[in-house]
Image (cartoon, helix red, strand yellow):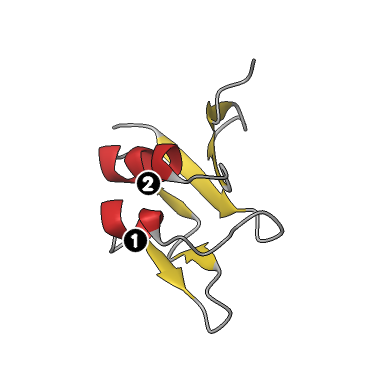
Amino acid sequence: MGDRWHVEVDRSVCIGSAQCLHHAPDRFRLDSARQSHPVAPDADASEPILRAAESCPVEAILITLRENGEAVFPPEE
């Protein structure tokens, strides 16, 4: 069994670029204010979710390991 991730979008940072929808359209939605949010906050680790986070121009997407809260993206310095 693979890793489980907890995915959040920092809505105070999100600018609604929709890059996350381009990379993982089944995992993110924009609301009426054009702010992104994950369809499901807890998900199996996947390349599309990671690409979505990496493509966000303001790094508004935060991914942590579900089991221990360790940062997946952005990586800890």
Task: Relative to 32, say whether 75 is above or below.
Answer: above
Task: Give the quadrant of residue 28.
Answer: bottom left
> Residue flagged by tag 1: what amino acid is it?
Leu
In the drawing, does residue 19 fall left or right of residue 14? Answer: left
Q: Is residue 4 visible?
A: yes
Q: Residues within 10 Å of mark 1 (few under 14, many from 20)?
A: many
Position of the N terminus, as image quadrant, is top left
- Name which residue lies at 34% across and 61% down: 21
- Name which residue lies at 38% across and 54% down: 19
In the drawing, does residue 68 fall left or right of residue 65? Answer: right
Mark 2 and 1 residues: CB-CB less than 8 Å, in contact? yes
Percent x, y for residue 49?
36, 45
Residue placed furthest toward the bottom = 32
Q: Which mark is residue 7?
A: none
Task: Relative to 36, say whether 6 is above or below.
Answer: above
Residue toward you, 56 or 5: 56
Q: Is residue 45 visible?
A: no
Location of mark 2 (residue): 52
Position of the C terminus, as image quadrant, is top right
Q: Secondary structure at mark 2?
A: helix
Q: CA distance from mark 2 to mark 1?
A: 7 Å
In the drawing, does residue 72 fall left or right of residue 27? Answer: right
Residue toward you, 8 or 43: 8
Q: Which mark is residue 21?
A: 1
Q: Secondary structure at mark 1?
A: helix
Task: Relative to 71, say whether 56 is above or below.
Answer: below
- Name which residue lies at 57% across and 45% down: 58
Task: Give the quadrant of residue 20.
Answer: bottom left
> Residue flagged by tag 2: what amino acid is it?
Ala
- Name which residue lies at 50% across and 45% down: 57
Percent x, y for residue 39?
42, 66
Residue toward you, 3 or 72: 72
